[in-house]
Image (tube, helix red, strand yellow):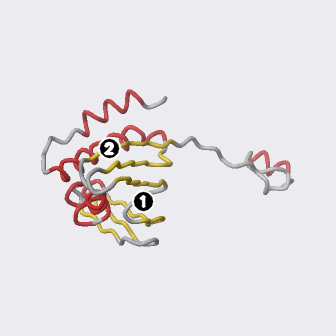
């Protein structure tokens, strides 16, 4: 087979068979910001302690809180997620992989108030509405956990709202 014939069979290859351009894929970033009338250490513990994450996320979680440590979330019948802690600067920054994307928690505050910024980076378009609604609902659960309040899960409602906002 000639090099030109090989290129015709696989348009990603050039005449040398090894200099194709990259496949380009659109991915997105989802960002949320929440303010809490709670100290930085309290909010940090809620997002970095596996027992607390399990309590507010409502799914069994294991977290090895160190760079290179594992995170495992068991979503029951929906499967599970395995990730790796990529960056850790307690009590301000926690980044871990989430499938083929990244989750970044950033906290700023003091002993009486905290601003939480959550980013999910590298979300594929077909996952945007579900990821957006899921993290939004998890943030509701986190707030309830931190304040001792309770509300109904809003995932379905939120998914409808996010579906309207997702670029097509």
Q: Which mark is residue 34?
A: 2
User: Circle 1 sits on which residue?
Assistant: 93
Q: Is residue 44 above or below residue 129?
A: below
Residue depicted at x 24% and y 48%? 37
Q: Residue furthest front?
A: 111
In the rendered structure, the answer to whether residue 72 lies left or right of residue 59 reads right
Q: Check disc 2 and report its element: helix, strand or loop.
A: strand
Quarter of the image where one finds residue 69: bottom left
Q: Check disc 1 and report its element: helix, strand or loop.
A: strand
Classify 10 Å Cα crowding around label 2: few (below 14), some (14-19), many (20 and above).
Answer: few
Split into 4 quadrants, where in the image is the N terminus? bottom right
Q: How many marks?
A: 2
Spot occupied by residue 107 in the image (x, y as percentages of width and height): 38, 54
Residue depicted at x 42% and y 59%? 93
Residue depicted at x 22% and y 66%? 51
Quarter of the image where one finds residue 130: top left
**How far apart, in angstroms, are the residues tagged by discs 1 and 2?**
15 Å
């Amino acid at each position: 087979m000639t090099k030109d014939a090989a290129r015709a069979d696989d348009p990603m290859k050039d005449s040398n068979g090894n200099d194709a351009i990259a496949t380009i894929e659109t991915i997105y970033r989802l960002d949320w910001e929440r303010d809490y009338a709670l100290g930085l250490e309290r909010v940090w513990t809620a997002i970095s302690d596996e027992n607390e994450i399990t309590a507010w996320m409502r799914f069994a979680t294991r977290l090895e809180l160190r760079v290179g440590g594992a995170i495992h979330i068991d979503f029951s019948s929906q499967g599970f997620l395995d990730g790796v802690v990529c960056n850790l600067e307690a009590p301000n920054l926690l980044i871990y992989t989430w499938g083929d994307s990244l989750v970044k928690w950033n906290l700023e505050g003091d002993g009486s108030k905290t601003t939480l910024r959550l980013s999910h980076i590298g979300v594929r378009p077909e996952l945007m509405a579900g990821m957006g609604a899921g993290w939004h609902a998890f943030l509701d659960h986190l707030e309830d956990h931190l304040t001792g309040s309770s509300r109904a899960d809003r995932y379905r409602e939120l998914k409808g709202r996010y579906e309207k906002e997702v670029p097509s």
